[in-house]
Image (cartoon, rainbow, N blue to C red):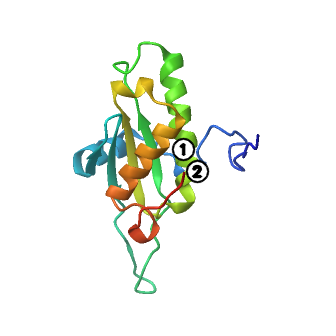
Amino acid sequence: MLVVVDKYTKSPTMLPKENRLRHHQDFSAIYQKGIRKNTSHLALRALPHKQKLDLATDTLQSPGPTRIGISISKKVSKGAVVRNRIKRQIRAALRQMLPFISPGWDLVIVVKPTAQMCNYEEFLQQLEKLLAQTEVFDGYSRRNLL
């Protein structure tokens, strides 16, 4: 079995530091202004970064890296073990898709209570569907990651 270890965190279960969404203000902005898409087990909130103009050179700055957060409540499961397992599976699927995701997005994955029955392949399929619907993939085309 091949395990890819992240060069930033030295852990196979974490997203790179620049791709993590951590602040409450960022989550709130995405919930209020973001695009909403749903599947049976997951919901996606997506907000593109605003492009900034560099006044010194009069050119548009490149958007920052895509940042991703995962929201899972106790409605999914009272047990932290189950919630953490689901988060690990979603992070692993997102890490696999990260090279195909366009830079400049803030994403929040909201886990629904029905996700308790999902396995890794189902999470991968649902995330691929959500990202394709919101046109977050490079070139806005749906990619077959399976």
Q: Is residue 124 left or right of residue 136?
A: right
Is 131 rendered above or below residue 9? below
**In the figure, residue 13 lies in which quadrant?**
top right
- Amino acid type, mark 2: Gln
Query: 10 Å neighbourhood of mark 1: few (<14), some, or many (≥20)?
Result: many
Mark number displayed over residue 104? none
Instruction: Tell me the element at label 2.
Output: helix
What residue would you read off at disc 1?
Answer: 93
Measured as percent of width and height from the top left, residue 93 is found at 54, 44
Q: Residue 131 location, x and y as percent?
A: 39, 54
* Residue name at image x 68 percent, y 40 percent: 12
Residue occupying the point 38% across, 51% down: 129
Q: Residue furthest left?
A: 32
Mark 1 and mark 2 in contact? Answer it, CB < 8 Å.
Answer: yes
Residue bearing mark 2: 96
66 vs 83, nearest the viewer: 83
- Mark 1 residue type: Ala
Regarding mark 1 in the picture, which secondary structure is present there?
helix
Residue 44, given in percent of the width and then of the height, sits at 34, 45
